[in-house]
Amino acid sequence: MIQDIERVLLTQEEIAAKVSEIGRKISEDYRGRRLILISVLKGSVVFMADLMRAITIPCAIEFMAVSSYGSGTRSSGVVRIVKDLDRHLEGWDVLIVEDILDSGRTLAYLREYIASKGAQTIRIAAFMDKPERRCVDVYPDYCCFTVPDKFVVGYGLDYDELYRNLPYVGILKPEIYGE
Ligand code: IMP
Ligand code: MG
């Protein structure tokens, strides 16, 4: 696994410090609100697990799964809900928890969808943001790291379903995905 990584982009220590900081900020901003974190599977699972424990106010959690990538490294633009929400969201302040904001198509779609479920407010917490690749008008309200336009894996992010269990974020060697 490690031999497929060109270089480490974010170390475990950098990640832990930043996620704690964002968790503190969210705890302050949502004090007294009815906060629900909606994690977008599977990429955000590691960030979700760390972020929810860095949040010190009561919050609910939910999971959704969408598919837009297949096994390539570019978004197809077609978002499909693979696992839906189990509840309505009336009265809840939703924070969508995502691994990375790339073209933005997944989150643009999800934001609309979650709004249609009656959420009171909707914000986005993205572990990483790749602003150079944005095609639609979506920006993270909370973001741990802005990253260059490189294909990255680890800390939940995959290439062809592998590398999610790397505890840090690394840039994948381009020869692995054949570019
Ligand atoms: P978007 O719809 O183009 O913003 O794509 C978002 C999704 O694409 C993310 O939730 C990831 O699952 C995936 N993705 C985008 N960039 C990367 C990357 O560099 N590594 C791994 N997955 C990525
Ligand atoms: Mg993915």
Image (spheres, rainbow, N blue to C red):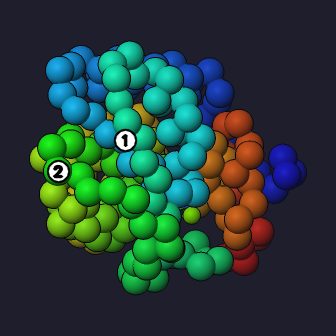
Disc 1 residue crowd, few under 14, some 14–19, many 20+, Cα 10 Å: many
Image point (50%, 39%), residue name: 48
Disc 2 residue crowd, few under 14, some 14–19, many 20+, Cα 10 Å: some
Based on the displayed image, in which of its 4 quarters is residue 123 positioned?
top left
Name the amino acid type tagged 1: Leu
Is 54 on the left or on the right of 163, as rendered? Answer: left
Location of mark 2 (residue): 90
Image coords of residue 42 (percent x, y): 58, 57
Based on the displayed image, in which of its 4 quarters is residue 43 positioned?
bottom right
- Count of marks overlaid on the render: 2
Is 127 on the left or on the right of 103, as rendered? Answer: right
Image coords of residue 56 (percent x, y): 38, 16
Q: Secondary structure at mark 2?
A: loop
Q: Is residue 97 visible?
A: no
Is 50 on the left or on the right of 32, as rendered? Answer: right
Image point (20%, 40%), residue name: 93
Image point (29%, 26%), residue name: 26
Question: Residue 37 shows which numbered tag?
Answer: 1
Q: Is mark 2 within 8 Å of ligand 1?
A: no
Q: Nearer the viewer, mark 1 or mark 2?
A: 2
The earlier-in-sequence mark between 1 and 2 is 1
Q: Nearer the viewer, residue 151 or 109?
A: 109
Q: Is residue 36 above or below residue 85?
A: above
Image coords of residue 134 (percent x, y): 31, 64
Image coords of residue 173 (percent x, y): 73, 60
Cα separation between marks 1 and 2: 14 Å
Q: Secondary structure at mark 1?
A: strand
